[in-house]
């Protein structure tokens, strides 16, 4: 039972080969585009690598880059094969090459689809990585004198200003962390001593945020200190005030930014996947229809082309049998013993 | 004595025409480049229109845009002419147009040069526009409730954060204006009333700056208020503190930015000017060699091309005389004192059938 049989008269074969040549060039450029998109995504992820805890999400751009390069190779060979396909003298030399070629091509094309699925599936991993990274960034904000952490303040300030966000989940994260270094605290004043005594860890906690949380669109000069104290500022109510500082948390903003980028890239990669798939399908039809012509006297006869010689289930079983034999040799032996035991009985 | 005379064989002429055809198309592209540079400069200046006072600085991008468009048109025509010049019959079509075309293009290249030099001279005007514009913007910083000025605060804040600058000449400019609106001042408090009374105009002046002046590279949290009061902050000395706020003034930062853009544009325009001049020289040689070819009669022969037929001085003198005689064409001839009744002997040359009477009597 052949899968998706189609009749191919000589003229249709010629047109198929020509169409396939054009399609393979389109797919080559699409493959180059995929590679560039992978590079773009990797660059964007690396730019904010300081606020990410792990690099698990980097597997998405890596996959895209690998697929891009592989599709360049796949489409190059597709172009060469379709050029030789119509020439009965040159086509036979591709005979041994074609089956492994299809297997490899199918693998890389499915990898494209996998990359798109991964970009959605790894949202949770990205969010967790950002949560830890931002928490550390806020914790080490004050350590501008510690080697290895001295740029955290700068990183977090620029991040908050560029993405218009404040804190991890929201601005209240700054209330739970000492973000003013002890070097700039006057321990002789009563106020400082009170604050440090007020909590178990002896940290200087304030209901203030750094200047980078200030919203330039606010009509009034920025209120950074004593945010929760309405009486400290004239005509101010912190419960209803929305324009003073940025209300969104940086984690949410960054996740939205990256998911938006990956959605766009995913849409483009899906269309590249369709183009690549059609290249492979056309090439398979061309191969099977030209193979039927081989050895015939009249090269102009109508032939049949198909995708798979047997049905899907049979083809899958054909490939899985040797694998199963390796995994489960006991079953085969026990069925033999059972047969032998059964025989003397009968 | 011709200026820079060169001999041209037929093949050399044809090659010159072909090369000039290609170069003219390249010049069309450079004309487009000029146009887009002018457009870019116009967009950049318009982006910060709120921070620039009304000054005549738009003439430079406008000039670049118009020069770019004219260059495209001239070089397009030049390309067509050079394409036709390979064939001597087609050249005759353009024969009368070529010299005026070359003269026009020569004067046009002066416009390109002027455009390039203007780019370098714009700095003074721009500085004046920025000083006034920034002063005005800082004055209106607090008026976020006045229609037409409500976005000035955001513009100025984003400018200071983006260009890493503070104030007009420096951060002390903020000490001289009231940048906190009266809506947010509690006039019941003694401190506020004292400050308002401390100056003639009743403005709330303080030694504080907006948050956008804060330097992100500072190791300590930003000190925005009581900047000049060392005792207000622990371990702080404002005279030596350089990393707390942005030290550069926004006028200088913007000026540097625009000067960089205009110097790059000016350099590009100078290179384009040199290129146009070389194309024009080629066209002039082509024109003179083809005209000399026409005089010789044989289309396959060698001809000479030059830049000027006579030396510079002679050409200048003859052109000056032409201009003088153009001016004289309306004047009456004053030799006979303007009296039309006096007979002026004719100076016509007689042909064979029109001999004077003296000769006929001798023959008889």
Image (cartoon, rainbow, N blue to C red):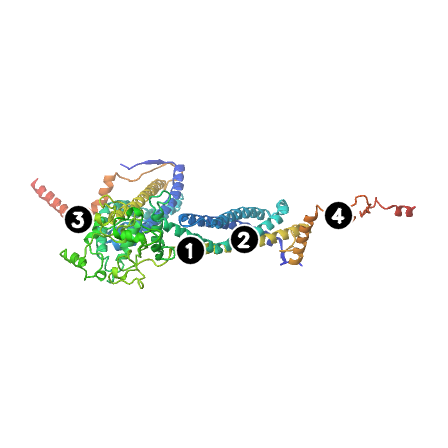
Give residue B333's mark. 4
Disc 3 vs disc 4: which is toward the camera?
A: 4
Near mark 3 (Cα within 10 A), the count class, few <14, some 14-19 or many ≥20, is: few
Near mark 4 (Cα within 10 A), the count class, few <14, some 14-19 or many ≥20, is: few
Q: Earlier in the sequence, mark 2 or mark 4?
A: 2
Which quarter shows the N terminus of chain A? top left
Give residue B276's mark. 2
Give the alpha-carbon distance from disc 1 to disc 4, as whole Å.
63 Å
Which quarter shows the C terminus of chain A? top left
Give the alpha-carbon distance from disc 3 to disc 2, as whole Å.
78 Å
Q: Tell me the element at label 4.
A: loop
Disc 3 vs disc 2: which is toward the camera?
A: 2
Q: Quadrant of residue B231?
A: bottom left
Marks 2 and 4 in Cβ contact (< 8 Å):
no
Q: Tell me the element at label 2.
A: helix
Marks 2 and 1 in Cβ contact (< 8 Å):
no
Q: Chain of mark 2?
A: B
Near mark 1 (Cα within 10 A), the count class, few <14, some 14-19 or many ≥20, is: some
Marks 3 and 4 in Cβ contact (< 8 Å):
no
Q: In the displayed structure, would residue A197 be above or below residue A93? A: below
- Residue in the foreground of this view, choosing between A265 and B8: A265
Q: Is residue A99 visible?
A: no
- Residue in the foreground of this view, choosing between B146 and A270: B146
Residue holding disc 1: B255
Residue holding disc 3: A327
Give the alpha-carbon distance from disc 2 to disc 1, as whole Å.
31 Å
Marks 3 and 1 in Cβ contact (< 8 Å):
no
Residue that extends furthest to the bottom in the rendered view of this protein:
B240
Give the alpha-carbon distance from disc 3 to disc 1, as whole Å.
75 Å
- Residue in the foreground of this view, choosing between A72 and B201: B201
Q: Residue B363: x percent and y percent?
A: 91, 47
């Amino acid at each position: 039972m052949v899968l998706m049989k189609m009749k191919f008269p000589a003229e249709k074969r010629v047109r198929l080969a020509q169409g396939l040549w054009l399609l393979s060039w389109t797919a080559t450029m699409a493959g180059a585009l995929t590679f560039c998109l992978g590079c773009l995504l990797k660059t964007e992820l690396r730019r904010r690598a300081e606020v990410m805890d792990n690099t698990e999400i980097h597997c998405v751009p890596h996959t895209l880059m690998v697929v891009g390069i592989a599709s360049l190779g796949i489409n190059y060979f597709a172009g060469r094969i379709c050029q030789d396909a119509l020439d009965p003298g040159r086509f036979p030399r591709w005979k041994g090459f074609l089956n492994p070629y299809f297997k490899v091509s199918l693998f890389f094309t499915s990898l494209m689809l996998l990359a798109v699925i991964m970009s959605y599936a790894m949202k949770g991993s990205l969010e967790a990585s950002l949560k830890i990274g931002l928490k550390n960034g806020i914790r080490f904000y004050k350590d501008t004198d510690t080697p290895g952490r001295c740029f955290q303040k700068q990183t977090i300030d620029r991040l908050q200003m560029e993405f218009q966000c404040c804190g991890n989940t929201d601005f209240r994260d700054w209330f739970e962390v000492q973000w003013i270094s002890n070097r700039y605290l006057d321990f002789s004043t009563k106020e400082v001593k009170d604050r440090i005594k007020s909590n178990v860890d002896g940290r200087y906690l304030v209901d203030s945020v750094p200047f980078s949380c200030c919203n330039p669109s606010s009509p009034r000069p920025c209120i950074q200190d004593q945010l929760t104290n309405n009486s400290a500022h004239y005509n101010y109510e912190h419960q209803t005030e929305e324009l003073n500082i940025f209300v969104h948390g940086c984690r949410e903003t960054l996740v939205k930014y990256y998911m938006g980028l990956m959605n766009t890239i995913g849409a483009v990669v899906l269309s590249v996947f369709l183009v690549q798939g059609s290249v492979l399908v056309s090439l398979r039809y061309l191969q099977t229809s030209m193979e039927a012509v081989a050895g015939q006297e009249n090269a102009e006869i109508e032939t049949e082309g198909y995708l798979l010689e047997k049905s899907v289930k049979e083809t899958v079983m054909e490939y899985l049998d040797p694998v199963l034999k390796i995994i489960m040799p006991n079953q085969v032996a026990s069925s033999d013993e059972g047969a032998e035991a059964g025989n003397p009985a009968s | 004595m011709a200026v820079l005379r060169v001999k041209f064989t037929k093949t050399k002429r044809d090659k010159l025409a072909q090369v000039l055809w290609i170069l003219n198309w390249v010049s069309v592209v450079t004309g487009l480049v000029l146009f887009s540079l002018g457009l870019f400069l116009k967009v950049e200046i318009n982006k910060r229109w709120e921070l620039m006072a009304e000054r005549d600085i738009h003439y430079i991008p406008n000039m670049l845009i118009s020069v770019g468009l004219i260059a495209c048109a001239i070089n397009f025509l030049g390309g067509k002419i050079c394409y036709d010049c390979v064939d001597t019959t087609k050249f005759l079509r353009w024969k009368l147009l070529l010299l005026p075309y070359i003269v026009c293009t020569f004067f046009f290249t002066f416009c390109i040069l002027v455009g390039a030099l203007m780019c370098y001279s714009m700095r003074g005007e721009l500085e004046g526009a920025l000083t006034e514009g920034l002063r005005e913007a800082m004055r209106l910083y607090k008026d976020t409730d006045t229609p037409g000025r409500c976005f000035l605060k955001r513009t100025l804040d984003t400018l200071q954060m983006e260009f890493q600058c503070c104030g007009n000449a420096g951060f002390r400019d903020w000490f001289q204006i009231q940048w906190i609106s009266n809506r947010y001042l509690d006039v019941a408090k003694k401190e506020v009333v004292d400050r308002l009374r401390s100056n003639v105009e009743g403005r709330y002046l303080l030694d504080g700056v907006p948050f956008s002046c804060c330097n992100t590279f500072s190791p300590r949290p930003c000190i925005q208020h009581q900047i000049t009061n060392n005792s207000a902050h622990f371990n702080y000395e404002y005279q030596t503190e350089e990393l707390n706020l942005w030290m550069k003034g926004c006028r200088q930062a913007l000026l540097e930015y625009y000067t960089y853009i205009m110097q790059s544009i000016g350099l590009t325009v100078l290179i384009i000017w040199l290129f146009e001049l070389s194309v024009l020289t080629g066209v002039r040689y082509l024109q003179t060699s083809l005209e000399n070819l026409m005089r010789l009669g044989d289309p396959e022969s060698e001809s000479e091309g030059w830049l000027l037929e006579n030396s510079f001085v002679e050409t200048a003198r003859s052109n000056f005389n032409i201009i003088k005689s153009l001016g004289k064409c309306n004047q009456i001839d004053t030799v006979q004192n303007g009296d039309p009744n006096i007979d002026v002997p004719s100076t016509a040359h007689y042909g064979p059938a029109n001999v004077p009477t003296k000769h006929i009597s001798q023959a008889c």
